Amino acid sequence: MEDAEDAWCDFLTHSGNIYTKLRAACYGHPLDFGWFGKQLDERARDPLLLYIHKARNSETHRLDATVEQAPEASHDAEINNRPVRINFPRHLRPVPVTDEHGNVYDAPTTHFDEPLGYCDASMLALFATIYFEWLVNAASSRLR
């Protein structure tokens, strides 16, 4: 399970690097920097993206744990209007993170107003990675 925790920390670090590199690429280009500002606003409004950002900061600067080991579990969900039971092996569960101002951010339950279902670190990383891939592709198509 320690390898999974290390992978989660690496994911948080790399997710922060995406924004750092985009900021540098947009710097000095007013239209691109304006576009980047909109992406930062989106990150501040979306519960998943905000949590990933705050967890990265907490993990990097405060050395607080952002996940905890959870035992086997199951979750009832609905897929294509049919009930299903999803079984999870031991996994990492995100925990609330606190920023430098004392604000607490619970693990997200939605991403762009869509429910995430059972919240574990691998699910959060999957949905965030899909978004980051879109973000990088969008930036690549517009940056000079």
Image (cartoon, helix red, strand yellow):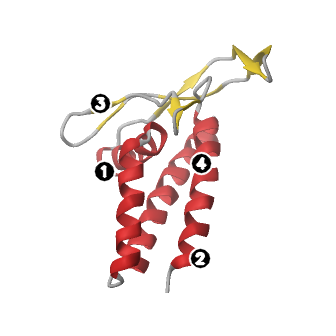
User: Going from the N terminus, do you reach mark 3 or mark 2 first?
Assistant: 3
- The amino acid sitting under disc 2 is Ser
Q: Nearer the viewer, mark 1 or mark 3?
A: 3
Label 1 sits on a secondary structure element that is: helix
- The amino acid sitting under disc 3 is Val
User: Going from the N terminus, do you reach mark 1 or mark 4 first?
Assistant: 4
Kindly identify which residue carries mark 1.
Answer: 61
Kindly identify which residue carries mark 3.
Answer: 104
- The amino acid sitting under disc 4 is Ala
Q: Position of residue 34 (x, y in %)?
A: 35, 70
Q: Position of residue 23 (x, y in %)?
A: 38, 71
Q: For marks 3 and 4, give the CA distance.
A: 23 Å
Label 2 sits on a secondary structure element that is: helix
Left or right of 112 in this view: 117: right
Kindly identify which residue carries mark 2.
Answer: 141
Pointer 2 with pointer 1, Cβ within 8 A: no
